[in-house]
Image (cartoon, rainbow, N blue to C red):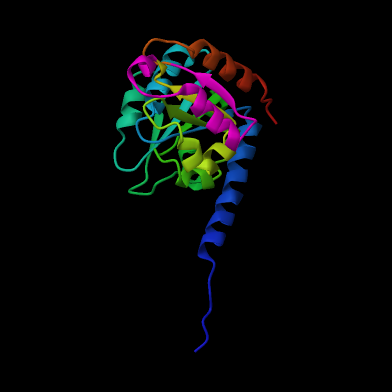
Amino acid sequence: MAVRKIEVRERVMARNNEIASDVRARLVAHGVTAINLVSSPGAGKTTLLEKTLAALGEEMDIAVITGDVQTQNDADRLAAHTSRVVTAVVTGGACHLDALQVLTAMDEIELERTQLLFIENVGNLVCPANWDLGEKEMVVLFAVTEGEDKPLKYPKMFQNARRVVMTKVDLLPHVPFDMDRAVANALSINPKLSVFRVSALTGEGLDSWYDFLRQSARQVTPG
């Protein structure tokens, strides 16, 4: 008998991209800047968001959607730093968020009183790179406790990102990590990357991060 090949992945991705366009249009209509935070597990996404919410949460009307494989632990941590609802998406084993999950989570957010929306993706440097969530841009976190060759091992993530946040820089005196080499590897994959160096523990570099967020939010005008 003949074999009929069905391109399921292509259909799923095409549908996701359609929904991502709806997400993007809805955000633009409300003047909301959405940032998709991605990283390996343990790179410091939640800690950076805790500091950001504490410093800018009220000033910038920040809302948060978190993605995790099994628990809502990250959402619970972030909820302690904001009076707003933190929307937790538990993927049940899936290694990334998709646009439909973001669109559904947005129903719990008062977009009319939101300037900045953080989407904290599942900790993974492979799957999230392929899924448009309707965000303005993707920001990848890269901890100094990881290998300098992470960008070379996971190039698509760094190709799709516009910013790299080097995290846990307070640990540099204690780990065998070559910052210059790591940054050079990232830029070899994507020469247009902007790089931040931060420590959420000591506060080093956070002012530059906050300035970027303020500037990014100012660039979005309600449609």
Instruction: Give the answer, above or below, for where 77 lies relative to 208.
Output: below
**Would you say residue 102 is visible in this rendering?**
no
Residue 34 is inside the magenta segment: no
Q: Residue at x 54, y 43 (%)?
A: 156
Residue at the extreme bottom: 1
Q: Is residue 193 left or right of residue 90?
A: right
Q: Indicate the position of residue 191 as horizontal and vertical percent values.
A: 64, 32
**In terms of depth relative to the viewer, which is nearer, 126 or 100?**
126
Q: Is residue 2 left or right of residue 92?
A: right
Q: Which residues are magenta?
A: 170-198
**Would you say residue 19 is visible in this rendering?**
yes
Number of marks drawn: 0
Residue 194 is inside the magenta segment: yes
Q: Indicate the position of residue 65 as horizontal and vertical percent values.
A: 44, 33
Q: Residue at x 58, y 39 (%)?
A: 159
**In terms of depth relative to the viewer, which is nearer, 50 or 59?**
50
Q: Is residue 82 left or right of residue 107?
A: left
Q: Indicate the position of residue 103 as horizontal and vertical percent values.
A: 51, 42
Question: Is the C terminus in the top left, top right, bottom left or bottom right quadrant?
Answer: top right
Instruction: Give the answer, above or below, for where 2 lies relative to 38.
Output: below
Q: Residue at x 38, y 10 (%)?
A: 202
**In terms of depth relative to the viewer, which is nearer, 177 or 157?**
177
> Toward which corner of the image does residue 221 lie, by quadrant?
top right
